[in-house]
Image: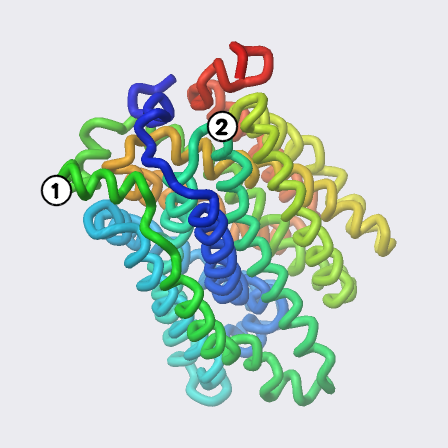
Amino acid sequence: MSSGTSISAEAGIPSVSESVVRRTIITSVVGQALEWYDFFLYGTASALVLGDFFFPVGKDPLIGTMLSFAGFLVGFMARPIGGIVCGHLGDRIGRKRVLILTLFLMGGATFLMGLLPTYNSIGIWAPVLLLALRVVQGLAAGGEWSGSILIISENVAPSRRGFLSAWSPGGATTGFVLSSAAFLLARTLPHDDFVQWGWRLPFLASVVIVALGYYVRRKIPESAEFVKLERSNARVRMPVLEVLRHHPKTLLMVFGLRFGEGGASFVLFVFSLAYGKFMGLSGNLLLGALTVSMVLMIPLSLWFGHLSDRFGRRPIYLAGGLGIMAVAFPFFSMLQSGNTWMIVAAYVLSVSIAIGALEGAQPAYMSELFPADVRYSGLGVGREIASVLGAGLAPVLSTGLLAHYRSPWPVAAYLFLLGLSIVVALKFTPETLPRHLRAGGAER
């Protein structure tokens, strides 16, 4: 086990009542769902409408879509900055305060996107303003994941951390489902109404989401481990520098675990919609199939989180990486079939099961690699830099490959390599769940 792992300090975790744990989980999940609704909304809109309204370049619609996905990348490029700033604040002033800040940044930017004039109205300023708001979203997202995970994981013992921490990404998945459902609902409008104003409605709904999210999030108690650090005056003055100086290997581990998972996720979540549009498949069919797979991913990721409490984080994560490799080529073949049930099965196998295994084990695995005094910063730096090169680049690169080759097979090879990168990263990342807590180890 890494020397930076805080798992060994299980006995030092302050006692937290079951009612507090339940309330923390519920409020974290709801807050995550509301905030990631905003972030994922751009990805869905990029695949379906933003390329036409903000990046109308040339006769090939794939070029406009690719430029729209470039805005997706811009948001991810801002995430490491958000991770550094929010990580520093989270390790200094607390997890809860930072989570309220990220909520207002994310929701405000999304609401303003719904008010932007299109390229036909103000020309080049339309994509410039859209990308500026995407940067704000990226800054907020850079601090959101880590904080929402830690607010749960730092309140529970290692023997339950995998299952309970997996509730938080379940909230993020719910946010994706909500964003997809919002676009499905908007697309039921007459075509002319959708083009003129209907696509804006999911963005404008953020004003309600911010209000509800703040009401929910302000009730989250501060994490027990941070409270312990605060009372003992053990907080680090410059946590980001402390991570860079003393935990560089752990940063690389987190980077490796996230890079392949993030890239694979956004090939499946975002690029697949653009590919379906290129193939002439129904956008509603693809959104519906993706939504079904995301709904199923919630209980499956919780189950995989539970399994990580029994067998360890590493074997579950390995199963997810191998799953990505296994579905890479069949996924696009099943989409090409045009058969509704084959398309649904493609998303279920890749998203619900393969990505679900990674999402279930990742929160506990990553948080256990760093000690509490630099944990927010460590996760913010390592995970969010990987998000740029993995998740942020994936839709742009995939669309570029499709535009050049007019075939999905180079993208399938790319997806396979992303899964392989997870397997390679695990070669260098230790198990973090103590042996005596694993099935087959000492008596539990």
Q: Is residue 388 visible?
A: no
Measuring from the top left, give residue 337's x and y in whole percent.
Answer: 85, 50
Question: In the image shown, does 68 or 377 lie closer to the viewer?
Answer: 377
Measuring from the top left, give residue 255's x and y in whole percent.
Answer: 40, 35
Q: How many discs mark residues in the rendered view?
A: 2
Measuring from the top left, give residue 38's x and y in whole percent.
Answer: 49, 66
Q: Residues within 10 Å of mark 1 (few under 14, many from 20)?
A: few
| Rendered position, 317 above or below 145 | above
Which image quarter holds the N terminus? top left
Q: Residues within 10 Å of mark 2 (few under 14, many from 20)?
A: many
Disc 2 designates what residue?
159
Q: Secondary structure at mark 1?
A: loop
At a point 58% along the width and 53% down the height, the residue shown is 173
| Rendered position, 137 above or below 80 | below
Question: In the image shown, does 439 or 356 lie closer to the viewer?
Answer: 439
Tell me if label 2 and label 1 are in contact, CB under 8 Å.
Answer: no
Of mark 2 and mark 1, the one earlier in the sequence is 2
Q: Amino acid at mark 1?
A: Arg
Q: CA distance from mark 2 to mark 1?
A: 31 Å
**Which labelled disc corresponds to residue 237?**
1
At a point 52% along the width and 30% down the height, the residue shown is 422
Q: In screen coordinates, is 358 left or right of 1? A: right
Q: Quadrant of residue 230?
A: top left
Dot in front, 2 or 1:
2
At a point 27% along the width and 48% down the height, the residue shown is 87
Q: Secondary structure at mark 2?
A: helix
Measuring from the top left, give residue 277's x and y in whole percent.
Answer: 71, 63
Q: Is residue 318 visible?
A: yes
Q: In screen coordinates, is 141 left or right of 64? A: left
At a point 39% along the width and 72% down the height, the residue shown is 109
Q: In screen coordinates, is 236 left or right of 437? A: left
Q: Amino acid at mark 2?
A: Ser
